[in-house]
Image: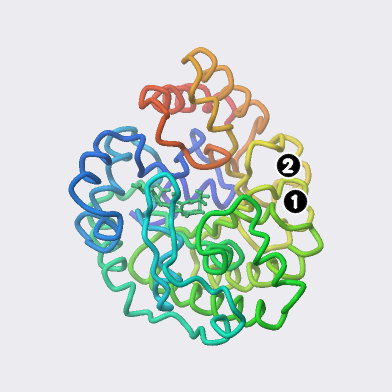
């Protein structure tokens, strides 16, 4: 079956589909008991870089929920690792770098990522694509240069990312040097993902909301556009998720992305008016709703479907990642409701 028959890809391109396809951000993660069982035996890096484990964890949510797309199990921080900056995942903190870029000298010593570092990831993609049903899509992904740079400079998750924000003002040359090296490395990494078999590429700019619109526009957006152009040249849909970018849709719609991922702070109907049906929209249920009763979840999922309304070009998703405390039944309620109710809007 060719790519055109995958419902997720059809929706990315705004074409006719029988129901609204869905997948869930961070669907391959710790809310799943089957993920936790594997995670007990292996560390995060072993899971990312062992093709069979990567395949297994990627397919777990598809087996359980029959989502329309699988997202490859990996992390945005493999890019810094390919540049020689390693991190460890520390319980209750998150990713922590041993040697963050906390001086101009360290930033200026950065060079392009080593593509051979991704070999096992590309092997994993090939294995997943062989086992995944042809009607389902495999989403590859990357972090945006800005979001990745935040972790490299700060060295760990931060409440405000103020050191890298200060760098933009104090040493824009060093900042651009880092962004340039990230952008080129990311483009090579995406090429490898697409060659290995991913059907679409999502770019996560999770930390964009820490910037003013003006700074985002000059210091992050140009790099995003270069990456999107590179994805588009590879003939797979590009999905841009800019967390906190709901108020910047007039700008984001010029990114060249086929799909804009939205967090829950914007109404889908308002967003649809801005993009005028030319760009598909992905989102945007608040993940915290999944901590409520099934009745409430059902009602809120219906509201999202109604807010997009009639027509194509909607991919159902959460407005951000699912958290480990969310009950597995809550996700089943989302899936059932989307499958049952969304055909009414087609
Ligand atoms: O088992 C564990 O303890 C690992 C937790 C975990 C998981 C499951 C991390 C560490 N990363 C991942 C996988 C992951 N990360 C995926 C895989 C596929 C899926 O979606 O199912 C994806 C797409 C990511 C992307 C990612 N990593 C982002 C962007 C998206 C987002 O959620 O905002 C970011 C910011 C990261 C960094 C990161 N890696 C891991 C954690 C806990 C974090 C966030 C740290 C923070 O709070 O800033």
- Residue at x 60% of width, y 57% of height: 205
Determine the CA span between mark 2 and mark 1.
Answer: 7 Å
Work out which quarter of the rendered image holds the N terminus and state it: bottom left
Image location of residue 50, percent across then percent down: 22, 61
- Residue at x 41% of width, y 30% of height: 325
**Residue 114 figure quarter:** bottom left
- Residue at x 52% of width, y 20% of height: 297
Dot 1 falls on a residue whose secondary structure is helix
* Label number found at residue 174: none
Left or right side of 298 for 36? left
Judge by depth and name the residue closer to the eye, 189 or 117. 117
In the image, residue 86 sits, relative to residue 28, either above or below, namely below
Judge by depth and name the residue closer to the eye, 62 or 48. 48
Image location of residue 345, percent across then percent down: 59, 28
Work out which quarter of the rendered image holds the C terminus and state it: top right
Q: Is mark 2 within 8 Å of ligand 1?
A: no
Judge by depth and name the residue closer to the eye, 107 or 181. 107
Image location of residue 189, percent across then percent down: 43, 73
- Residue at x 37% of width, y 47% of height: 91
Mark 2 Cα-neighbour bin, 10 Å: few <14, some 14–19, many ≥20: many
Judge by depth and name the residue closer to the eye, 107 or 342. 107
Residue at the spot of label 2: 271
Left or right side of 172 for 27? left
Mark 1 Cα-neighbour bin, 10 Å: few <14, some 14–19, many ≥20: some
**Residue 86 figure quarter:** bottom left
Dot 2 falls on a residue whose secondary structure is helix
Cβ–Cβ under 8 Å for marks 2 and 1: yes
In the image, residue 62 sits, relative to residue 341, either above or below, namely below
Image location of residue 290, percent across then percent down: 49, 25
Residue at the spot of label 1: 249
Label located before the other in sequence (2 or 1): 1
């Amino acid at each position: 079956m060719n790519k055109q028959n995958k419902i997720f890809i059809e929706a990315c391109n705004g074409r006719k589909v029988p129901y609204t396809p869905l997948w869930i951000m961070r669907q391959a993660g710790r809310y799943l008991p089957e993920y936790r069982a594997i995670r007990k035996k292996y560390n995060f890096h072993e899971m990312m870089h062992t093709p069979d484990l990567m395949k297994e964890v990627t397919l777990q949510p598809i087996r359980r929920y029959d989502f329309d797309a699988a997202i490859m199990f990996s992390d945005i921080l493999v890019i810094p690792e390919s540049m020689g900056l390693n991190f460890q995942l520390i319980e209750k903190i998150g990713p922590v770098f041993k040697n963050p870029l906390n001086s101009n000298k360290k930033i200026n010593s950065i060079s392009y990522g080593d593509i051979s570092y991704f070999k096992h990831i590309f092997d994993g993609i090939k294995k997943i694509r062989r086992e995944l049903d042809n009607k389902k899509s495999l989403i590859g992904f990357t972090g945006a240069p800005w979001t990745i740079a935040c972790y490299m400079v700060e060295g760990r998750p931060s409440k405000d990312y103020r050191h890298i924000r200060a760098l933009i003002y104090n040493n824009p040359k060093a900042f651009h040097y880092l962004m340039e090296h990230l952008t080129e490395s990311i483009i090579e990494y995406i090429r490898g993902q697409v060659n290995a078999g991913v059907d679409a590429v999502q770019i996560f700019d999770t930390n964009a909301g820490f910037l003013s619109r003006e700074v985002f526009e000059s210091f992050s957006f140009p790099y995003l556009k270069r990456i999107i152009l590179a994805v588009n040249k590879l003939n797979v849909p590009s999905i841009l998720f800019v967390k906190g970018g709901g108020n910047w849709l007039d700008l984001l719609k010029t990114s060249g992305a086929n799909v804009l991922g939205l967090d829950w702070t914007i109404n889908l109907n308002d967003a649809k008016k801005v993009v005028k049906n030319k760009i598909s929209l992905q989102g945007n249920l608040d993940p915290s709703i999944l901590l409520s009763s099934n009745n409430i979840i059902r009602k809120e999922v219906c509201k999202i479907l109604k807010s997009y309304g009639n027509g194509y070009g909607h991919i159902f998703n959460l407005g951000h990642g699912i958290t480990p405390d969310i009950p597995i039944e809550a996700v089943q309620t989302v899936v059932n409701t989307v499958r049952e109710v969304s055909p009414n809007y087609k």
